[in-house]
Amino acid sequence: MAGEEQENNNNKGFRLLGILDVQNTPCARDAVLHGAGGSLGAGLLHFLTTSRVKRSFDVGFAGFLLTTLGSWFYCRMNNAKVRVQQRRIQDGIKNKIILQRTPHPGSRSEKKEILNRLQNFFLGSCPNLHKILRLFQASRLAHRRVTEVRRRLVYSDSSRSND
Amino acid sequence: MAHPSQLGFQDAASPLMEELLHFHDHALMIVILISTMVLYIILAMVTAKLTDKLVLDSQEIEIIWTVLPAIILILIALPSLRISYLMDEINDPHLTIKAMGHQWYWSYEYTDYEDLGFDSYMTPTQDLTPGQFRLLEADHRMVTPVESPIRVLISAEDVLHSWAIPALGVKVDAVPGRLNQTTFIISRPGVFFGQCSEICGANHSFMPIVVEAVPLQHFENWSSLMIEEA
């Protein structure tokens, strides 16, 4: 049943030049529609400004090519980024149980360790750098404390309003 | 598997096949646009009423129609090379299976832990049950775990064969006296069909390949059962 429905959809789908299945190829439909819109807009604009019919057709066609290509590459790039993120999430979910309660890259303890290593490395080569690092750490610590205090205030305010 | 009158690729069941589909769409879109442009230019030239007898050369258009095709070729070549090298990556397989081509059946050997081997003959049309596929079903399927890198070593006992499964993006020649290797990861459970892809005699069209991807627990149960039966 599902196969028959899919077969009907595939048969009825529009194929550009008889080969590109616009319906089932990701980004193809959007690219072709954007191209058609761009072609119409560019051709019409050119005709309105110059009143030259044939040249307007040429400009319209060039607009179709450029808009389709641009829309296609932009959409494919975004799709590729989403696919990479999706794969990372899938791997993360799969490995969640394995990595539970172990420090994974990006955890606070690992960041602290990396920071300490960087400090030790650079302190040897640049004596003034440790002062900069200390200032940076101090400012980050201060910012964190301020954020914590703010959170506590907001939480206590909301609990008082609930009461 | 393919549905009747299907022209395009089957849905991807492995990450490599997904990348191949992605590249195919990219290359096809470029080809479509170039073809459309050529058709338009032909129409424009055929319907043009004016002819310029004094045009002998034009440096600008020569530069355009040299540089633009070069750019287009680079845009096609870079993803193509990327996939080509991706296909040859070695990714530490969890399981190795040997697929041997014979006239006219395949045999599979799982020899990593125990000696397990069996032959896979096509199910004759008169023995098919309702719902099974003609010329594609086999009596024993090659069962593999899902989402595990699998290495398949392919060879032949007599003449040239070819082990191919479109949904996984795999096609490897089975050459007598030579061992060819391919690795793949099956992303989802299911049954995937393929057919021998190198002419090998009278029944070349009647030696299908059937791969069944199952969760690891089911694979372990199946392999224990097969070893007991043997």
Image: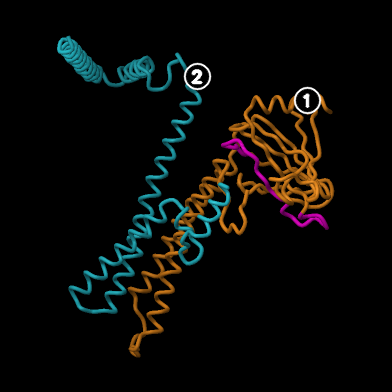
The dot on residue A42 is none
Q: Which residue shows up at 80% across the image and 46% down it?
A: B127
- Count residues near mark 1 (Cα–Cα under 10 Å), then give few for <14, some for 14-19, many for 20+: few
Q: Give the chain letter at badge 2.
A: A
A159 vs A116, left or right, is: left
Q: Position of residue A121 (x, y in %)?
A: 35, 19
Res. B114 mark: 1
The span from disc 2 to disc 1 (Cα, nearest Å) is 30 Å
Host chain of mark 1: B
Q: Nearer the viewer, residue A116 or B193?
A: B193
Relative to residue B32, is residue A10 depicted above or below?
Answer: above
Q: Is residue B175 magenta?
A: no
Instruction: Give the image quarter of residue A69.
Output: bottom left
Residue density around tag 2, few if under 14, some if 14–19, many if 20 or more, within 10 Å:
few
Please state if B160 lies on the left or on the right of A105 as rendered: right
Q: Nearer the viewer, residue B28 or B214?
A: B214
Amino acid at pointer 1: Glu
Colour chain B is painted in: orange
Mark 2 element type: helix
Image coordinates for residue B200, horizontal then vertical, percent: 80, 55
Q: Amino acid at mark 2?
A: Ile
Percent across and percent down for residue A140 are 22, 18
Q: Is residue A141 above or below residue B226?
A: above
Residue at the image position 64 percent from the left and 46 percent from the top:
B170
Q: Is residue A127 above or below residue A163?
A: below
- Residue B197 counted in the magenta span: yes
Q: Secondary structure at mark 1?
A: loop
Where are the magenta residues, as a range? B184-205
Mark 2, residue position: A97
